[in-house]
Amino acid sequence: MRNDLLLRAALGEPTDRVPVWMMRQAGRVLPQYRKIRAGVKDFKEFLAHPELTAEATLQPVSEWDVDAAIIFSDILVIPEAMGFPFEMVENTGPIFTKKINTINDIKALNIVSDETFINPTLETIRLVKKEITGQLPLIGFCGAPWTIFAYMLEGKSGKDFSRARRFLLDEPEAAQLLLEKITQSSIYYLKQQIKNGADIIQIFDTWAGILGYSLFKQYSFPYLQKLFLAIAEMEVPIIIFLRGCPYGIRSLSLLPKAVIGLDWMQIPAEARALAGPNLTLQGNLDPSLLYASEERIRSETLSMLKDFGSLHTIANLGHGLYPDIDKEKARIFVDTVKSFRF
């Protein structure tokens, strides 16, 4: 592979510079994405067209020369494939058309075990790999079991997901059954992504931080661990991104060769102390800093890189690109990382 910096950094191997990519780099801020998206009725229909999602996957590679592509998809592919459909409402987010009230609702859900509902994602991977084989890695991904659970129980996006958290306490047996079904479905999904060409995987636990430490230990980490260990058998690097969950870093450090993705609220030196010297850390520039001047973006990016130190690092944002960020500001971030040397 011409550019294997991301893979080597994820494995803790030496690199001549810090690799860089950005969460939500595909879409959002790119006018070329908005152009192809304009011709499709809604987001779910767009996901059903692999030729379009493959193009969206490749656009940031051409635009910014980042060190990896990440498939254009959505973490809610899994509940849809389990028989729990959603609609993506403009300016609102996902709205699920069913509701989970009892354990019987959960028993009616499928464990994903064939390609019927995930084939558009797999075809996207196959199309992208035809274009980038031998050039740079492709990142596959899924949502963490708890994060998917939170969306399914709440029925939509939210701030505190109080219904989902209450369900953990009111219906612990049902909650564990749903988390197990999501985990098994996600294992199958990720293994199929890898078999079709994904070189590295990221697991997004976007809502880990709404759980206190006790609930995180019971309802998030055990299922993350099960998912991680099953995918580790495929011998690809795995990044786990926790948002708003500093107490999760020490738990993740127990997973062999995990890459720990940090949000922008984490202090790299403190995260390193929790993770130990051997694991790779990824992150974690505050995405809102990309609204700043060119000088400020360069200064903040360099400060972040120095805070991480010379140990194993992948540069990224602390969350995804915001849709109104100027693509040239994102370019400044990427170029600053690529020119940096310890």
Image (tube, rainbow, N blue to C red):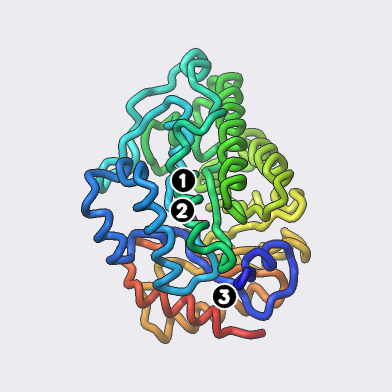
Mark 1 and mark 2 residues within 8 Å of each other at the beta carbon:
yes
Per the model, the C-alpha gap separating discs 3 and 1 is 37 Å
Residue pushed farthest front? 130
x 32%, y 66%: residue: 30
Of 236 and 243, nearer the camera is 236
**Residue 280: where, in percent of width, then height?**
69, 63
Q: Which mark is residue 127?
A: 2
| Disc on the earlier residue, 3 or 1 | 1
Q: How many marks?
A: 3
- How busy is the neighbourhood of tag 2: few (under 14 within 10 Å), some, or many (20 plus)? some
Per the model, the C-alpha gap separating discs 1 and 2 is 6 Å
Of 26 and 113, nearer the camera is 113
Helix, strand, or loop for circle 3? helix
Asked if residue 215 lies left or right of residue 118, the reply is right
Mark 2 and mark 3 residues within 8 Å of each other at the beta carbon:
no
Query: The disc labelled 3 sits on which kind of residue?
Result: Met
Q: Which mark is residue 304?
A: 3
x 60%, y 25%: residue: 176
In this rendering, the answer to whether 105 lies above or below 212 is: above
Of 330 and 65, nearer the camera is 65
Of 10 and 276, nearer the camera is 10
Per the model, the C-alpha gap separating discs 2 and 3 is 35 Å
Residue highlighted by disc 1: 123
In this rendering, the answer to whether 237 lies above or below 105 is: below
Query: The disc labelled 1 sits on which kind of residue?
Result: Glu
